[in-house]
Structures are given as structure tokens and as C-alpha cells.
Image (tube, rainbow, N blue to C red):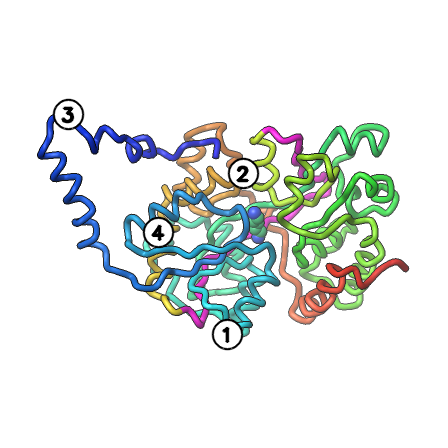
Amino acid sequence: MAFAAPGEAAAGDHNAIYPPNGSRTVKKWIMAPLLAFALSPVHAQPLNVANWNDYIDPAVLADFTRETGIEVNYRTYDSDQEVYALLKQGEALDVVVPSTDNFGKLIREGLLRPYAAASLPGFEALEPLIMARVAGHDPTHEYGVPYLWGSIGLAVNVPQAEAALGGPVPNTWGLVFDKALLARLSACGVTLLDSANDVTSLLANYQGRSLGTAGEAYVSRVLEQLGRLRPHYRYIDSSRYVDDLGSGKLCVSMAWTGDALAAAAKGLPVKFMVPEEGSLVFVDILAIPAAAKNPEEAQAFIRYMLRPEVSARIARATYYQTPNARARQALEAEGGSVQAARLSADMFGYQAPREEVGKLIDDFWPRLLENRVGGR
Ligand code: N2P
């Protein structure tokens, strides 16, 4: 990643291990690991953590293991449906990171374990606006603390999109939702995120409506519309699109902020824009599955993630936003290196769909993914 974490240079300083004069330091070299071993309990089983793709600084995991002695078995997923299915199947997971809507559903279905999240050290530093969103699903903060948040926009390979449109690229959700624009772009490759509530909400917003207050009849029409647009999308997926945009296989993708900003920072020809109709903010939550085999270690992991310096490192590496006010202040003080979005209440207009509307979307979504709808 582009920015080295503070302290990395010291950890890699080999002179500290092989000094010119020294039995004292040699002893330290032998003793230090022994001491660390004696201090940290031995954990027979690794901690199974499942998180979104490209959503961590791997060095943070290594440091957690070094400090606690807890090995982490880390796997990734690309969608809420995927993590929901893993939990339903009884997969042995100790920490998962659902988005807020999915978090609410997992609590309702008894798939998460309460861990008195509000009593963890560092909880008080979490941003009130983010906590208000989380409280909509977990009012007394028993089941989770926020991990990262971000937004959704359009990632565009500008030369390709301009060529397809024969002129400048307008900054509108119409690029992925308007049939006429989409028809002109589809040959160069347009994709959507595999994120059912977000896509449905953004299309409703594009039509001047809100998913939170929408009824079943309206949402059915929105879903039918997505079905009709489906043939114009190259695919619906949340991890492949950044590389494909970079290599020119696509020209417009609905994108998570961090993934697109990280690609642009790497020098890929990807421009991220938030369309003029506005967007939504998502928040992802650190939660412990009801069936977790290592709930104590899972809590230790979550406590570690709540440390401001750890949260700042993750935000720096992933280009997503920290929910931790202390971490945000530290990032802002560094200046320019990170897109530290300013929190404002109007970013939080998104409301989860009512339960029956949520079910409608959940039932429809797999058919859209498999392209079993549309064409009418
Ligand atoms: C993708 C992470 C996005 C999380 N890198 C969306 N909830």
C-alpha cells in the first residue's frame, strides 16, 4: 500500500538484532520471544475471521497475532448474501463484518451472539452519526461496533466511456440506470455492485423516491425495471470490476468508494465520481456469530480493531472511512494522504427497507444475478 504505517521501519531494523557489541542484546534477542510467549496465552485454535474483499491492512492482522498469540484464519467474501449463507450453513466463523441491513437481519434470525459491545474500551470514540445508523438495528449496542464506512459512486474509465458516448461523461446515475445512456455504453462494459439493497435504493433515489418508505408495489416495479436493464450489464459483481476497469475491459461500474480510490491511487485509469443525484453511505459492523467457537478471542480481536491507531491504519490502507473520531482526527492531521470524508447528516439519508420489502428484494436478487429475469 502507498503509505507505510508508523513504526514499520523500527520493526524491520535488523541492526537491533545483530549489534556489534553484544551479549546483552543477544540475550534480549533470545529473551524477547520467550517473554512474549510467556505473556500471551497459547491459543490452540485459530480465530476464523470473514470480512469483505480488500477491506484490511494485512499487517494489522500480523500485529494482532504478535501481540496476543491468537492466529487469525482470514477469509473474504463479496456480498451480504454470501456471509448470510455461510452463517446459515453453520460455517465455523468467529468474527463477521455484515453491512448494517444484513446485521439487523442476522440479529433477528438469532445468528449473532451479543457481546455487550457498548462496554468495550474505545466505544465512546465512535462517531455519533454512525452510531445512530447502527442503533437502528441494535438499539442498545449488544451485538456490534462499526468497522469502516464508505459510499457508493461510479468508477469510470474516462477515455473508453467518452469514446462510447461521443463526448464528455455526464455525472449521473443515468449512466447505469437510464436505458438510452446504458444502451450506448453497454458495448464497452457496464457493471453493477452485487449489493441488493444498495442498488435498489440508488435506483429508487434516481427516480426521486426513498427505499425506506417505499411499499411493495413500487419496489416490485423497481425490480422489474432492473430486470429489463439486466441484458445491458456485463455482470453484477463487487470484486472483479476494479481490475477490469483498469485494463479497459469495462467503462463504467457502480463502485465502492475505497476500491475505486485505491485503484486511482495505484495509477489505474479509473475516475471515481459521486453522481449529482446523490448517493448513500454504508456502514459495516464487527459481529460475533452465535455459533462462534472462540467468542473470547473474537472480542479481543474487536477490541484491537477499536484502537484508534489500528482503525486509522486500516482506513489508510483501504481508502475507506473510519468510524472512530480519534482515528479520523489523526488522519485529518496528516493532511491530504487520505480522503477523510467529512461526516454530515445529509449523507445518512439511506433507510433500510421495511421487512416485507427487504424480503422481496432478497427473493428477486439471485434471479437477477443469474440473469433469469428481464428482456421484456
Ligand atoms: C469492498 C468493501 C465494501 C464493503 N472492498 C461494503 N459493505
The mark that comes first in sequence, 2 or 3, is: 3
Which residue is denoted by mark 3 in the rendering? 20
Indicate the secondary structure of the residue bearing disc 2.
loop
Q: Residue at x 70, y 67 (%)?
A: 357
Q: Position of residue 207 (x, y in %)?
A: 79, 51
Indicate the secondary structure of the residue bearing disc 3.
loop
Which residue is denoted by mark 1 in the rendering? 110
Whether pointer 4 and pointer 1 mark residues with C-beta atoms closer than 8 Å, the reply is no
Q: Is residue 320 above or below residue 7?
A: below
Which residue is denoted by mark 2 in the rendering? 341
The mark that comes first in sequence, 1 or 2, is: 1
Q: Is residue 140 visible?
A: no
Alpha carbons under labels 1 and 3: distance apart:
60 Å
Q: Residue at x 35, y 33 (%)?
A: 6
Q: Quadrant of residue 224?
A: bottom right
Q: Position of residue 324 (x, y in %)?
A: 42, 46
Numbered disc in front, either 1 or 2: 1
Which residue is denoted by mark 4 in the rendering? 304
Q: Which mark is residue 137?
A: none
Question: What secondary structure characterizes most of the magenta part?
Answer: loop
Numbered disc in front, either 4 or 2: 4
Numbered disc in front, either 4 or 3: 3
Indicate the secondary structure of the residue bearing disc 4.
helix
Q: Is mark 3 within 8 Å of ligand 1?
A: no
Q: How many numbered marks does the figure carry?
A: 4
